[in-house]
Image (cartoon, rainbow, N blue to C red):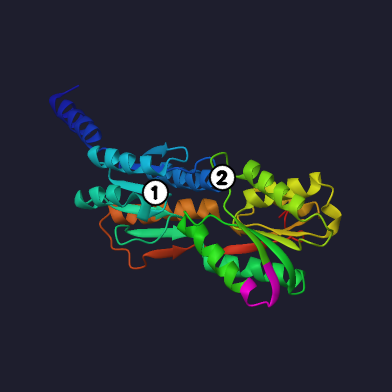
């Protein structure tokens, strides 16, 4: 190797070691949820294509711990942070990142001044479509059990809209508004709570429908109804997210009739696109970015 070749090779090696991949930390307490898993998969796939180093942090249902994890990521001087948690509950961590000029993007989180943007599905539209589906199926009358989760903004808004839809039908009564324990995903506790409601309302026809703000409670309610031998009463069950287990239940033609398909992979990949634009120094005009959804019934559950 001559002197020119030596210096050229050295320069290439220096440049290669000097260029570092962007680092992004993804923080969520909800990785046990299938939807969250798919968000993260979509994000990681796009991030890999961009050559980023991604660290996914799961606080396993501990929302308060997410604050410390945001602060840790800030101390590590990552290029960006992505959260899947109510921003209002982790404000102290967000402020730390903001003060360090590290952009934070919500991945189905919620709107907040400290977030550069939030990528999500339109929960208002999803809730309206599923609640109207229920109201129409029970012909505007009967008792409805609702499963909600007000602690998480994207889910909280669904309950608000469903309340409004059902409230517009004088002959629909919301029998109960249940917040299940989601530490294990939500199916088991929803099943137990639905079993109690069925026991308290034993007469056929005493429950017309179950509206769930996401699929896990709907699946738990389905299990309780079937195990109680009340599947033949025509209790209409509707969920949201259209995860694989829900699609299979809907396709079977039983009580679980409909769900809204969120494009979780697209939410994750779109979040990565937003993060990339921020890292590149570009401005994000829309603080809330919606990814399209679709109503799933037995007609298209296997598509």
- Which residue is labeled 2 in the image? 181
Disc 2 crowd, CA 10 A, few/some/many (<14, 14-19, 20+): some
Q: Residue furthest top?
A: 1
Q: Residue furthest left?
A: 3
The answer to whether one can see residue 51 in this image is no
Q: Nearer the viewer, residue 266 or 112?
A: 112
The answer to if 171 sits in the magenta stretch is yes
- Residues under numbered marks 1 and 2 in contact, where contact means CB atoms less than 8 Å apart: no
* x and y percentages locating residue 285 in the rendered image: 33, 68
Q: Quadrant of residue 113?
A: bottom left
Q: CA distance from mark 1 to mark 2?
A: 21 Å
User: What residue is shown at x 39% (from left), y 43% (from top)?
Assistant: 27
Which badge, 1 or 2, comes first in the chain's sequence?
A: 1
Q: Quadrant of residue 177?
A: bottom right
Q: Which residues are magenta?
A: 166-173
Label 2 residue SS: loop
Give the mark count.
2
Dividing the image into 4 quarters, which one contains the C terminus? bottom right
Above-or-below relation of 259 to 21: below
The answer to if 279 sits in the magenta stretch is no
* x and y percentages locating residue 136 in the rendered image: 73, 73
The label shown at residue 192 is none
* x and y percentages locating residue 101 in the rendered image: 21, 51
- Which residue is labeled 1 in the image? 83
């Amino acid at each position: 190797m001559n002197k020119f070749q030596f210096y050229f090779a050295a320069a290439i090696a220096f440049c290669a070691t000097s260029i570092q991949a962007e680092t992004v930390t993804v923080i969520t307490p909800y990785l046990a949820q299938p939807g969250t898993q798919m968000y993260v998969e979509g994000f990681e796939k796009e991030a890999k294509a961009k050559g980023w180093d991604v660290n996914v942090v799961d606080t396993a249902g501990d929302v308060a711990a997410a604050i410390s994890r945001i602060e840790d990521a800030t101390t590590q001087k990552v290029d960006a942070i992505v959260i899947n948690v109510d921003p209002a509950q982790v404000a102290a961590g967000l402020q730390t990142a903001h003060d360090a000029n590290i952009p934070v993007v919500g991945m189905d989180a919620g709107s907040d001044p400290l977030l550069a943007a939030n990528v999500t599905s339109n929960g208002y539209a999803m809730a309206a479509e599923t609640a109207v589906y229920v109201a129409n199926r029970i012909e505007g009358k009967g008792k409805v059990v609702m499963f909600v989760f007000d602690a998480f903004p994207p889910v909280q808004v669904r309950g608000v809209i469903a309340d409004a839809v059902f409230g517009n039908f004088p002959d629909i009564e919301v029998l109960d508004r249940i917040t299940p324990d989601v530490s294990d995903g939500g199916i088991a506790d929803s099943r137990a709570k639905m079993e109690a409601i069925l026991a308290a309302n034993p007469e056929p026809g005493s429950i017309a429908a179950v509206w769930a703000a996401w699929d896990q409670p709907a699946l738990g309610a389905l299990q309780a109804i079937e195990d109680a031998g009340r599947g033949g009463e025509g209790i209409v069950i509707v969920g949201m997210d259209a995860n694989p287990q829900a699609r299979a239940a809907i396709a079977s033609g039983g009580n679980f009739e409909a769900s809204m398909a969120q494009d979780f992979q697209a939410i994750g990949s779109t979040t990565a696109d937003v993060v990339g634009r921020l890292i590149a120094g570009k401005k994000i005009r829309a603080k809330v970015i919606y990814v399209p959804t679709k109503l799933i019934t037995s007609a298209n559950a296997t598509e």
